Amino acid sequence: MPTRQGDLALLDDQVAQRLLQSTLPARFAYNWDDGTLRVVPIGFHWNGTELVLGTPPDAPKMKVLGDGTKVALTIDSDAMPYKVLLIRGTVRTDTVDGIAPEYEAMTVRVMGEEQARAWLENMRPICPRMSRVFVTPEWVGILDFETRFPSALERAVEQAQVQG
């Protein structure tokens, strides 16, 4: 039986590990100060316990993201059978001089060494400081459309099996 949705142990699942090491962007969801929801695509780095997002300190999201803010994100493939990692968690933030090391690692992973170095050299003069958003997972879900499906679909399959 698969690990129950919500269990942090799902981060060790091979689907989660592949997505956490992939070149796919995360879709990051948070609440704006007027209560409306925002979702933005963003690169991420998995440090083994947290997702780390790098952004300029004056990025709009930094106006509403502070220590303790609740957020959600998803990393999902774009080919069937879809693989989806869902994470809900809490934020902590800081700002560092220069380009955050996690942003550099993400850039190399996504772009490859040569393109990443060129991108980072262009970023250094325009981003002398970088904010980091650390997302600590508190709830994790996986949909792989092979063994784990959306809950409504799983209930429909169970009901069909009972009805024979």
Image (cartoon, rainbow, N blue to C red):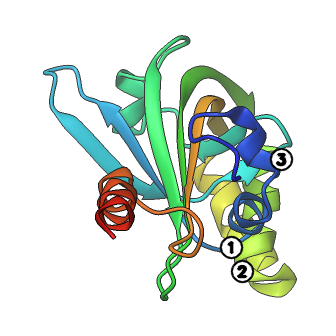
Q: Mark 2 or 1 closer to N-term?
A: 2
Image location of residue 52, percent across then percent down: 69, 41
Q: Residue at x 31, y 58 (%)?
A: 159
Q: Residues within 10 Å of mark 3 (few under 14, many from 20)?
A: some
Between 37 and 132, the one nearer to me in the picture: 37
Task: Report which residue position mark 2 lands on.
Answer: 111
Q: Mark 3 or 1 closer to N-term?
A: 3
Q: Decide: marks 3, 1 in contact (CB < 8 A)?
A: no
Q: Decide: marks 2, 1 in contact (CB < 8 A)?
A: yes
Badge 2 element: helix
Between 6 and 35, the one nearer to me in the picture: 6
Looking at the picture, does residue 62 appear above or below residue 160?
A: above
Image location of residue 123, percent across then percent down: 64, 61
Task: Report which residue position mark 1 lands on.
Answer: 119
When asked about the image quadrant of residue 124, the answer is bottom right
Q: CA distance from mark 2 to mark 1?
A: 9 Å
Task: Report which residue position mark 3 lands on.
Answer: 101
Q: Residue at x 16, y 22 (%)?
A: 35
The amino acid marked with disc number 1 is: Trp
Report the number of numbered marks.
3
Give the quadrant of the C terminus: bottom left
When asked about the image quadrant of residue 71, the answer is top left
Q: Residue at x 66, y 37 (%)?
A: 129
